[in-house]
Image (cartoon, coloured by chain):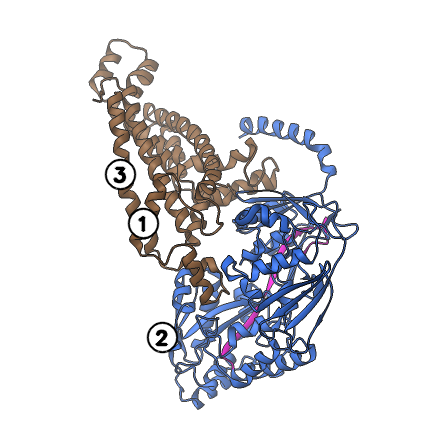
Amino acid sequence: MLKYLVGRLAGILPVLLVISVFVFGFVHLLPGDPARLVAGPDATQQDVELVRQDLGLDQPLWVQYGRFLGNAVQGEFGRSMKSKRPVSQEIGERFLPTLYLTIVAMVWATLAGLLIGVASATKRGRWQDHVGMVVAVSGIAFPSFWLGLLMIDLFSVKLGWLPTSGYGTWQHYVMPSLTLGLGVAAVMARFTRSAFIEIAREDYVRTARAKGVPARLVVWKHTLRNALIPIITMVGLQFGFLLGGSIVVETVFSWPGLGRLLVDSVNYRDYTVIQAEILLFSLEFIIINLLVDVLYAFANPEIRYS
Amino acid sequence: MNRFALPLLAGLLAGTALAGPAFAAKDLVVGLPDNITTLDPADINDTLSQSASRTMLQGLFGFDKDMKLVPLLAESFTVNDTATEYTYRLRKNVTFHDGTPFNAQAVKTNFDRLANPANRLKRQSLLAMLAETVVVDDYTITLKLAQPFGALNNNLAHPGAMIHSPKALETFGKEIGRHPVGTGPYKFVSWEADTLKVEKNDKYWKPGLPKIDHVTLKSVPENGSRIAMLQTNEAQFIYPLPPEMVKMVEANNQLELIDAPSIIARYVAMNTMKKPFNDPRVRQALNYAIDKNAYAKVVYRGYAGPLDSAIPSKLGFHVAQPNQYTYDLAKAKALLAEAGYPNGFEAEMFGRNSTNFIRGMQFVQQQLSQIGVKLTVTPLESGVETARVWGVEKPEDATVQMQYGGWSASTGDADWGLRPLLWGKGFPPKFFNVAYYKNDTVDAAIETGIGTADTAKRAEAYRVAQEQIWKDAPWIFLGVENLLAGKSKKLTGFYYVADGGLQMEEADLQ
C-alpha cells in the first residue's frame, strides 16, 4: 500500500507538467491584451508598452512559459497583474473560505443524499420513493442563483433571521451551504438509489435475507457497504467540483472564495492568477482521486493495491 | 421548517442581546459592486478604488459634492500667463495618520514619484507635463511645466494626485497600495479579500469631522444581494442601483433613492474617415433619426438626461447647444437623400458586451432602421474591443465604422472631456478619437484651452469647440446617464458625486 501511494504521488508530477502546458497555452490564447487592461482605459499607447515590458509580456511565449514553470516549481507564481500582490497570497486568502463552505455543503448533502437514496430504494415504487425523487429532481433543476436570491428574500429580508451575505459567523454559512449542497444532495440521492437497487439484486443479499438476517442489517451492512464504491467515486467528483469555488453561489452570497477570484481574473486577463488557480484545481482533483482510490480499499477490503 | 428554524432563531436572539450595547459606536457599511483593486491612487484606474482611497487620502485640490473644484491641502495658488509655472501655498498644521507632518517636501516626494515614468504608475499622465518641483519653503511649492497646461488644478484634484505620507512611501515601497497613509478623515484598519475597513481619524484637520467611527466598504457583486443588504440595514448605502430595482427602494419608507445626473456621456462615434460617415449630412441625419427620450426610457428606464453638447452639463465649461437634433424622421431622410443615400445603407456597430450596452445598441439599430440604415450590432468582450478599436496603429487600418460607447472625464474639466476623444492629434492608439474626427477650428480651440489657466479664455475656447463639434456631429449624441443609488434615511452627509465617486467625509448616522 505504501509503495503504491509513493508511486501514485510521483505520478502527479508529469500530469501537472502536461496540465501546465495546456493552462499556459489556453490562457495566452484568450483574446485581449492584458497590458492594455492593466494600463487602464485612458492610458496612452506608450504607457501600455511600458506595462507590457513590466509584465514580461513582450518576451516570446516559450521564454514566458519557462519563467512561469521555473517559478511554479519553487511554489512561486509571481504577482497578480491586477493587484500586484503575490499570487500565493491572493489565492491563499480565498482558499479557506471556499474549503470551509465546500466541507459544510458536502457533509450535509452527502448525508441527506444517502438517506433519501436509501429510503427511496428500500421503498421502491411507494410514496416515499416518489417524494424522494421529486425532491432530488427539483434539487438538480433549481438554478442556484434563483434559489439563493429567494432564500435571501425570505430569511433575511422578510424574516430577518440570517445575514444576507458575507463571511464570518455560522449564520453566514446557512444559506450558501444549503444552496451549494442542494444539487449535490440531489445527485447523491439518485446515485445512491440506483447503486442500492442494483446491489439489492445480488445473490448474497438474497442469501442474507433467506438466512434471517434482520432487514435493517441487510440494508445498512450488506447492501449499502457494497453500494459505497460508486457513491465514494461520486462524492470525490463532487467535492473536487465544489473546491473550485462555485461562481454563482459565491457571487450571490458575496462569499470571498476562489470562484469569484477566478471570474475576476478572467475578466481582467490576470494571467498569473488564472494559471495558478487552474493548476491548484487540477492538483486538488488529482489528490481527491487518489484519496478516493484509497477509500475504496477501506470500503471493500478485497481491493488490494500493489 | 419549524424544527430547523427554532434553534436558529434562539441563537440569533442571543446574538442580538449581546450585540446591543455596541451600537453606541457609529458604524457605516457601504455595498460596492466590485472589488477594490489597490489603495494607491496613483496606480488606480477605476472609480470604485478611487472612492475607497479618498476616505483616507487627499490632494492639494478636490471636488465638492457638485463637482466644483475646491482647495484641500492647498490654500491658494498663483500661475504665470503661459500656464507653465504654478506656485501653491500649502495648508499648515496638517499631519499624516502616521504622525509625519504634511509639508512641501511631502508634496514634492509624491509628485516626483507620480511624474516619473520609470515608476510605471497608471496615473502618470496627470503630471506627465511636470518638468520640475521646487520646494520654496516648508509650505510653498512651485511646479514648473515642460509645456503650458491650463487645467493643472483639475489634474491635481483628480484622486490620482492624492498625497501619501512620504514615510509610508519609503517604508512600504511597492506595497504602498496595501498600506495607505494619508491626511484624510479616516485611517486604514484592514483590507481582506472583498472588505475594506477604515476608522475615524481623531486628529483630522477639519474641526468636528468625521462623525462616523468605522466605515466598512464591502464588495457585493450581485445586485439582488446588494439591495437585500440595504433592506435589512446591513448596509446604509449601496450603489449602483439597477433601474429595475428603483421601485424596491421607493417602496420602503426607511430608504431613500439617489437619482442625479452623472458626467458619463453616452454616444455612438462614427468613423468620419470612412464612407458614408465622411459626409456630415449623414452624421446629422443619424442624429435626427434617434428619439433621445425613448433612448432614456428604453435603455435607462427613464434615468438618463440629454447629452446637449459634446460634454455633459456637469463638466466645467459646458455650453448647451441651441440647435438640438430633435427627433425628426422626415428631416433625417431628406438629409440622407441629399448626401446620396435615399435608401439608407448598411453598417456595423461595435460596443461592449454588457447587457446594458447591448440593449443600447439594439435600440439604436431599431431607430436607424426607420430611415433605411441597416446596422449589424457586434458586441465585443472588453479585451477584444481594446485590441480591435483602441490598439489600432494607423487610421487606415481601423475597421471600426461605428462605436457605441461612453466617457467619464474624471478631472471634471472640459479638456479631458474633449481632448482624448475629438482632438485631431488624438487618434488611437495615442488617445481615443475613434471618430477619427479632425477639424482645425476644434483642434486650435482645444489647444488654446489647455494652453492657458485664464478662465475667460478657456471658456471661450471650449465654447467654440463645442459649437463646431455639434455642427459636425462626429457622434450620435445619445444621453447622459443618471447615477442611481439607495441609502438609509438615517444616513446624512454622504455624497454620490457626478463622476461616480463617493464622498463620506461629512457622513453621519442619525
Are the two marked residues, 1 and 2, in contact with CB atoms closer than 8 angstroms?
no
Type of amino acid under label 2: Asp
Q: Residue at x 43, y 50 (%)?
A: A265
**Residue B291: x, y in percent?**
53, 75
- Chain bearing tag 2 is B
Q: Position of residue B336 (x, y in %)?
A: 44, 86
State which chain is coloured blue.
B
Magenta range: B473-495
Question: Residue at 49% of width from left, 49% of height from top?
Answer: A83
A198 over B240 or under it: above or below: above
Say which amino acid is labelled 1: Tyr
Quarter assignment of residue B12: top right
Which label is found at residue B397?
2
Give the number of the disc on residue A65.
1
Callouts 1 and 2 in the same chain: no
Q: Secondary structure at mark 2?
A: helix
Query: Which residue is depicted at the point 51% across and 79% down?
Result: B287
In terms of depth relative to the viewer, which is nearer, B484 or A207?
B484
Which residue is drawn at the image coordinates 60% and 35% (left, top)? A161
